Amino acid sequence: MSVNNRQLVLRKRPQGLLAPGDLELTQSTVPDLQEGQALAKVKYLSIDPTMRVWMAVDSYLPAVVIGEVMRAFGFAEIVDSRHPDYKKGDRVTGLTGLQEYVILDGSPRQGFHKVPKIPFVSDTVFLGVLGVNGLTAFFGMELGQPKKGETLVVSAAAGATGSIAGQIGKIQGCRVVGIAGSDDKCEWITKDLGFDAAVNYKHPDWKQKLAAATPNGIDIDFENVGGEIMHAVLDRMNLHGRVILCGLISGYTKGDPGLASFAMALVKRLRIQGFIVLDYASRFTEAATQLGQWKMFGKLKDREMIVEGLEKAPDAINMLFTGANTGKLIVKI
Ligand SMILES: NC(=O)c1ccc[n+]([C@@H]2O[C@H](COP(=O)([O-])OP(=O)(O)OC[C@H]3O[C@@H](n4cnc5c(N)ncnc54)[C@H](OP(=O)(O)O)[C@@H]3O)[C@@H](O)[C@H]2O)c1
């Protein structure tokens, strides 16, 4: 029986936010499965800022080739298999791409691994708190080597990664200050997630508020944004502070690196450590187990925003850059 597959194909490298026509919705027929392949139906797509980078330039992965299905992480269920490791009904996460069906070939390039069914827990956790974002927050915070009583500042603090990183900081005994782009987001991270303070960077006096919220300076910067925000945070770093360079989202749509001045890195003898979560693949199970326990015992709270329909994925990607999301952004197919 032939299976129709709707796919979002990269047609143009975006300038700024995604414009109509950068990704085109197309249809194709899924080819017959070969020995060693399995067919999975994609249920949820993870919407990540790095997708905008993948559309534009070579980075830690090569840029998506024009004319190919747009790369994306997703959650999928096996519907047919000629692969010894996969059977019908298995649930997997990996690089599904922005499409309704994906053929798995078991290669590391696709990065698929099986995930369990957890009673009373939504499958979407495997894209957020127990997926890329939770793992990124976990390993990033490990790099920051937090000590009890230190001050941690997290930017994009109400986003999928920042909201978890800040809560891990609380678990580890830090004073945690979040920087976010609305009063509602600031209220969520302080009232619901337990951050000690939050600063809305869209208020004109936000730098004074950051100073007031960090009276003892800043020991650890969990940096998701770069640019002016990172600059202001570096200005308040303590001697020998640690900067966990997780992301530089303020530069992704502008084609600049979004870096802050390095003068403070020199003057304050900072340790700046960039990382990519994929480097830690061999420890994902260990980290997901810890994150799962924290979630089960109510120490980690997460929030998801679900957008319905594959065709909405381009708009959803843009939501990350206008701050329209709180918590993990997901497209449901
Ligand atoms: N190193 C890794 O392996 C790795 C893995 C995953 C993610 N990341 C990085 O982590 C960061 C967060 O990713 P995420 O998936 O968790 O996304 P997210 O935080 O859920 O969403 C992005 C948020 O960034 C904020 N933002 C966007 N443009 C901004 C700007 N110009 N200035 C200030 N804030 C801006 C917006 O919140 P506001 O309303 O607060 O502005 C937006 O909601 C990104 O930089 C991403 O590249 C890195």
Image: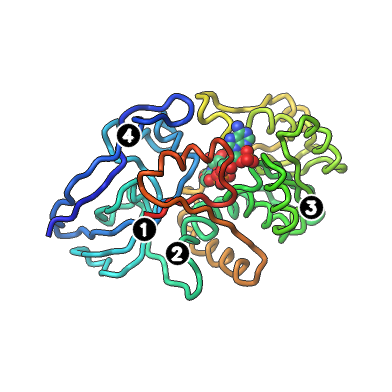
Mark 2–mark 3 distance (CA, rounded to whole Å): 30 Å
x, y (%) of residue 102? 27, 53
Amino acid type of the residue tagged 2 in the rendering: Asp
Which mark sits nearer the N-terminus, 1 or 4? 4
- Element at label 1: strand
> Taking 210 as reference, is 84 above or below it?
below
Q: Which one is in front in this view, the residue at disc 1 or the one at disc 3?
A: 1
Is the residue indicated by label 4 positioned so its CB lies within 8 Å of ligand 1? no
Whether the residues at callouts 1 and 3 have beta carbons within 8 Å, the answer is no
For residue 92, say whether it is visible.
Answer: yes
Which mark sits nearer the N-terminus, 1 or 3? 1
Mark 2–mark 1 distance (CA, rounded to whole Å): 9 Å
Mark 1–mark 3 distance (CA, rounded to whole Å): 36 Å
- At 54% across and 36% down in the image, what residue appears? 321
- At 64% across and 28% down in the image, what residue appears? 227
Mark 4–mark 3 distance (CA, rounded to whole Å): 42 Å
Q: Which residue is disc 2 drawn over?
A: 123
Which mark sits nearer the N-terminus, 2 or 3? 2
Q: Which residue is disc 1 drawn over?
A: 43
- Element at label 2: helix
Amino acid type of the residue tagged 4 in the rendering: Leu
Q: Residues within 10 Å of mark 4 (few under 14, many from 20)?
A: many
Q: Which residue is disc 3 drawn over?
A: 196
Foreground residue, 97 or 192?
192
- Element at label 4: strand
- At 47% across and 60% down in the image, what residue appears? 124
Q: Residues within 10 Å of mark 3 (few under 14, many from 20)?
A: some
Q: Is residue 273 left or right of residue 58?
A: right
Q: Which residue is disc 4 drawn over?
A: 10
Amino acid type of the residue tagged 3 in the rendering: Asp
